[in-house]
Image (cartoon, helix red, strand yellow):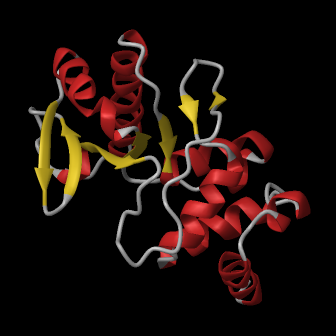
Amino acid sequence: MITVAAYDIYVENLFERMRRFHSALNGAGIPYRIIGGMAVFFHVSERDHDKARFTRDVDAAVRREDLKRIIRAAENAGFAYRHVAGIDMLVDPVQPSARSAVHLVFAGERVRPSDPEPIPFSDPVQTAEGVLLAPVEDLLRMKLTSFRLKDKVHIQDMDSVGLITSDIEELLPDALRERLKEVRATE
């Protein structure tokens, strides 16, 4: 049966997963940053809620040296750690799939060897609830590094509400600045 509430349920499950992850790591004193589409959503929504685009998963940057502690804290919060196809994730055992997981990337490391930049881990921005987000500068670098279609759309979303300032742009290395120009040329 098709139901209008299906989207509400999906969104609530996504936020509940992020809150559980936050509570687990925060309670254990483990630093993290929510990254990816979820972080873009929060930053864009802060400027213009109508321009915020939703995402389908939760991504987080963590330090590799914290992984064992993360796994213990996450297990106490009902997650199960999996390393599948080169991806580290915390899955919900009730719905064990990559789509119902928190995907982990490691600060200071490249996701793919060919990536022009490693994952940054600057001081976080906090939501009103205390969830730690990667700052816009870090998100822009990650999106320009990954440079998939959805990353380009997230860059356009951030740019459309004025989050990508000239100060941020000036700090980009030439290769990433060129990619930003390419995204802006397609708007």
Percent coordinates x, y for residue 86 in the rendering: 18, 61
Residue farthest top in this picture: 27
Name the image quarter holding residue 153: bottom right
The quarter of the rendered structure image containing the C terminus is: bottom right
- Does residue 52 appear in this view? no
111 versus 10 height, above or below: below
Whether residue 164 sits left or right of residue 139 in the image: it is: right
Q: Nearer the viewer, residue 55 or 1?
A: 55
Q: Nearer the viewer, residue 128 or 60?
A: 60
Residue shown at 77%/48% (left/top)? 48
- Does residue 83 appear in this view? yes
Residue shown at 63%/33% (left/top)? 124
Whether residue 70 sits left or right of residue 173 in the image: it is: left
Percent coordinates x, y for residue 125 in the rendering: 67, 32
Whether residue 168 sits left or right of residue 155 in the image: it is: right
Q: Nearer the viewer, residue 65 or 49?
A: 65
74 versus 140 height, above or below: above
Percent coordinates x, y for residue 172 in the rendering: 74, 68
170 versus 147 height, above or below: above
Percent coordinates x, y for residue 24 in the rendering: 33, 17
Name the image quarter holding residue 16: top left
Name the image quarter holding residue 109: bottom left
Q: Nearer the viewer, residue 48 or 118?
A: 118
Residue shown at 71%/85% (left/top)? 178
Residue shown at 69%/50% (left/top)? 136
